[in-house]
Amino acid sequence: MKSRRKFIQTLSMAGAAATLPLTSYGKQDNSGKMIHQVFFWLKDGEDVQDFKKEASVLGKCKTVKNAYMGTPASTEARDVVDNSYQLACTLFFESLEDQAAYQVDPDHLEFIKRNSDRWKSVKVYDFMI
Amino acid sequence: MKSRRKFIQTLSMAGAAATLPLTSYGKQDNSGKMIHQVFFWLKDGEDVQDFKKEASVLGKCKTVKNAYMGTPASTEARDVVDNSYQLACTLFFESLEDQAAYQVDPDHLEFIKRNSDRWKSVKVYDFMI
């Protein structure tokens, strides 16, 4: 518990520093807010719709402010577009601390326990907005 | 113009089909809505804050419903987290057609013309939400 507390404190300090130079649009004051963007590549034969249903619990975790999930769109094929994943999850958090709490949320951990053998890879992008 | 019209029609049909099996949370009816998620890796020596200022025009393009941009967050270092990019842009669109229109929006094209020599790579993920 001690190391976790220290970790949270470190995040808290990072969050405070991060309020200074951020730029965003769509909202006037997003200081400290962030997006946790996750992409899942499922193993061959996995049912995407069923996996999506399982993943819906992620958006209901206590510290998640807003959540969207989706599958690749039929946009124009371009070299820069990666549509090789099966599920995208966009989770909004009010702070770095809220995202850290999400990582140890019992519902999040239960999702991982139930489903981690279904994906072959995961990619995460975390950014302040 | 003919081929563009045909392209838009194709997108329109794809959009109609896409309204069927989509799952989302955070909103009850997101059918047809999508996220256009872009990551920029800038060339060495480029000023991230200046580039971010340039990129802010993207969120003001006519068909963009909502937009967020940000820089990597100080979340816990994990193998699955990619924080090697310099700028992330999350653009919400009401439809595939609106995203297609954005691709040829004069302000978007002007941004590309002014700044395309500043990045070494771009990655895009488009998904229905």
Image: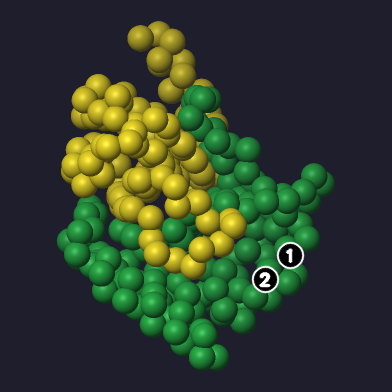
Chain colours: A yellow, B green
Residue A20 seen in the figure: no
Residue B105 shown left or right of residue B21 in the figure: right
Q: Residues within 10 Å of mark 2 (few under 14, many from 20)?
A: some
Above-or-below relation of A27 to A51: below
The secondary structure type at the circle numbered 1 is helix
- Above or below A52: residue B59: below
Q: Nearer the viewer, residue A33 or B107?
A: B107
Q: Which residue is mark 1?
A: B115
Residue type at tag 2: Phe
Residue at 45% across / 72% down in the picture?
Answer: B99
**Mark 2 — on which chain does it sit?**
B
In the rendering, at what x and y percent does residue A80 appear? Answer: 58, 56
> For this rendering, which residue is in front, A18 or B18?
B18
Task: Indicate the position of residue A77 as horizontal and vertical percent values.
Answer: 51, 63
Q: Are marks 1 and 2 in contact (CB under 8 Å)?
A: yes
Q: Nearer the viewer, residue A87 or B89?
A: A87
Residue B67 in the figure: left or right of residue A109: right
Residue in the image at 25% along x and 28% along y: A115
